[in-house]
Image: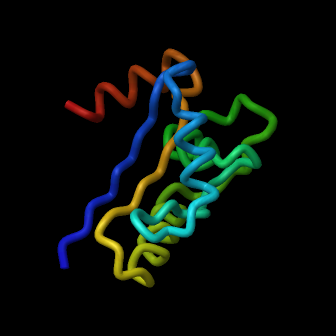
Amino acid sequence: MTRTLFFHVGPAKTGTSAVQYVLQRHDNSAVIYPKVGLWADGSHHNLVLNYFGEYGRPEVVREDPAELLARIGKEARRSTRESTAATGNAADARTAAAVQQRDR
């Protein structure tokens, strides 16, 4: 089965927090919302910030980004769902620029 990983890193104040709130609390019946790299608010900030090596915020728990993504893959493989979503707000202009550059 082909699976899709949706990874959304949105700029601040674009509704990402509302999406995170809903996805964190749902039962994974439609889409998997991995519990890897989450902050208390349900965002994947720890995943995003580790991926881009942004350690300036005191809340960041340093983890190997490859390991975090591997854990997401493991969680997705345990499910029969075809879609997995991870979300996070762009932490700053430098991270947002990096996301845009990698999307090209």
* Residue displayed at 48% across by 67% down: 72
> Where is 77 relative to 43, above or below?
below
Q: How many marks?
A: 0
Q: What's the residue at 34%, 51% (across, down)?
A: 6
Q: Quadrant of residue 68?
A: bottom right
Q: Nearer the viewer, residue 79 or 103?
A: 79
Q: Position of residue 25 (x, y in %)?
A: 63, 58
Q: How is the image coloured?
A: rainbow
Nearer the observer, 99 or 27:
27
- Work out whether 15 lies above or below 30: above
Asked if residue 82 lies left or right of residue 78, the reply is left
Q: Residue at x 54, y 31 (%)?
A: 89
Q: For the point 39% across and 47% down, which residue is it?
A: 7
Farthest-out residue, right: 58
Give the side of residue 83 with respect to residue 18, left or right. Answer: left
Quadrant housing the N terminus: bottom left
Residue 84, compared with residue 20, is above or below; it is below
Q: Quadrant of the C terminus?
A: top left
Q: Is residue 13 above or below residue 64?
A: above
Residue 102 on image: x %, y %:
29, 34
Q: Nearer the viewer, residue 99 or 9?
A: 9
Residue 96 in picture, x, y percent from top left = 44, 23
**In x, y percent, where is residue 94?**
49, 19
